[in-house]
Amino acid sequence: MLLKNKLGINNEIELAKEEERITKIKAIELFETGKLNNFEVGTFKGLAEIHKYLFQDIYEFAGKTRTENISKNHFRFVSSIYLEDALMKIDKMPQSNFDEIVEKYVEMNIAHPFREGNGRSTRIWLDMILKKEIGKVVDWSKIDKEDYLLAMERSPIKNTEIKTLLQNALTDKINDRDVYMKGIDASYRYEGYNLYKTEDLKND
């Protein structure tokens, strides 16, 4: 489904290419200007600020919680009517060590607060927490993309797999732009979201 955008693009493939190009430029700006350091770490507010900066030239909903219900491969992310409560609970989750940080990351993925652009924004958000709390970030070049997507899909049931993948890819190169930018690679993102009506929950 083609998303309404500020670019006036009516082709899904063209939109995806422009989205990737623009968000990578914006991500570099965040890194090189130091603006990223001004955002809250480990809160939805901080995540929303990241998302808004990356996508504000593309979508009106940049930085705003979704009002639609979305699913992926038969997994339904948090219903929009419960989203605010879920995000408040995530804000309160501890983040003092690696396990707690990844558990918080998994919960934010289940929340999937934005209509589009969750993966890229949340990976930056994750690295900000890791950097602050344990002096590490993820070197995404060390993680196979298919392994990552499968681990994230299974993480709501069991998070051991995603913890192992991320832990094995930790690096102390916290100020390396190349390491940072690898997490923006759109190839990591979930694609093919399906919309469903809140009433559909009654059929679960």
Image (cartoon, rainbow, N blue to C red):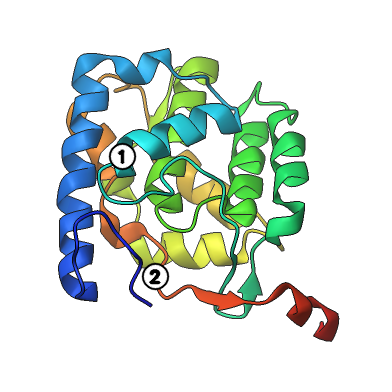
Amino acid type, label 2: Glu
Q: Is 55 displayed left or right of 83 in the figure?
A: left
Describe residue 141's horizontal placement relative to residue 92 as left or right. left
Does residue 144 appear in the picture of this structure? Answer: no
Q: Is residue 162 left or right of residue 100?
A: left
Mark 2 = which residue?
191
Percent of width and height locating residue 68: 59, 64
Q: Position of residue 193 (x, y in %)?
A: 48, 73
Graded by Cα atoms within 10 Å as few (under 14), some (14 to 19) or many (20 or more), the crowding at tag 1 reads: many
Can you say whether 1 is above or below 103 in the image? below
* Quarter residue 92 falls in: top right
Q: Whole-percent x and y of residue 73?
A: 55, 79
- Quadrant location of residue 11? bottom left
Residue at figure coordinates x 55%, y 18% from the top left: 133
Measure how far apart labels 2 and 1 are at the Cα level: 18 Å
Residue shown at 25% from the left, 54% from the top: 6
Mark 2: few/some/many CA within 10 Å (<14, 14-19, 20+): few
Q: Give how far across and how far down residue 101 sits, in percent.
A: 61, 33
Secondary structure state at the residue bearing disc 2: loop
Apparent side of residue 204 relative to residue 30 in the rendered image (left or right): right
Q: Nearer the viewer, residue 175 or 2?
A: 2
Q: Is residue 123 above or below residue 175?
A: below
Type of residue at label 1? Leu
The residue shown at (19%, 62%) is 8
Contact between marks 2 and 1 (CB within 8 A): the answer is no
| Residue at (15% x, 69% y) in the render | 14
Q: Is residue 90 above or below residue 177?
A: below
Q: Nearer the viewer, residue 29 or 124?
A: 29
Disc 1 target residue: 54
